[in-house]
């Protein structure tokens, strides 16, 4: 799975909408949708913000085990 697919899966499992996650990390919903689709690259700082909101690790986002 790609990082975007992992973000979508973790976000959906947490019951958080795209709109809510985007607002909490300070980006637009369309940008988050592009990241989840894999059409926009994600920066490390933004990845970190996502992990804080979704309460997961960077390893979870990249699909690797600790």
Image (cartoon, helix red, strand yellow):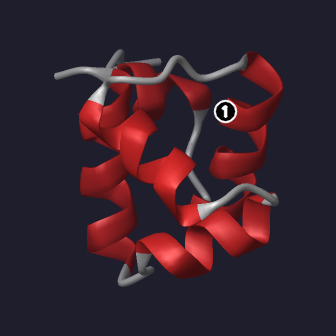
> For residue 13, which quarter of the picture?
bottom left
Of residues 16 and 32, the one nearer the viewer is 32
> For residue 39, which quarter of the picture?
top left
* Residue 59 percent location from the top left of the image: 49, 23
* Residue 42 percent location from the top left of the image: 59, 23
Residue farthest along the front direction in this orientation: 30
According to the image, label 1 marks what residue?
Answer: 47
| Image: 32 above or below 38 | below
Alpha-carbon neighbours of circle 1 within 10 Å: few (<14), some, or many (≥20)?
A: some
Residue 31 falls left or right of residue 9? right
Of residues 7 and 56, the one nearer the viewer is 7
* Residue 11 percent location from the top left of the image: 39, 64
> Residue at the spot x=59%, y=27% of the render?
58
SS under mark 1? helix
Residue 7 falls left or right of residue 43? left
| Image: 31 above or below 47 | below
Residue 64 falls left or right of residue 52? left
> Residue at the spot x=53%, y=77% of the render?
19
């Amino acid at each position: 799975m790609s990082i975007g697919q992992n973000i979508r899966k973790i976000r959906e499992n947490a019951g958080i909408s795209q709109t809510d996650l985007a607002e909490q990390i300070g980006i637009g919903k369309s940008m988050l949708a592009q990241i989840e689709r894999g059409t926009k690259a994600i920066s490390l700082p933004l990845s970190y913000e996502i992990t804080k909101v979704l309460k997961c690790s960077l390893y979870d986002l990249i699909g690797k085990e600790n």
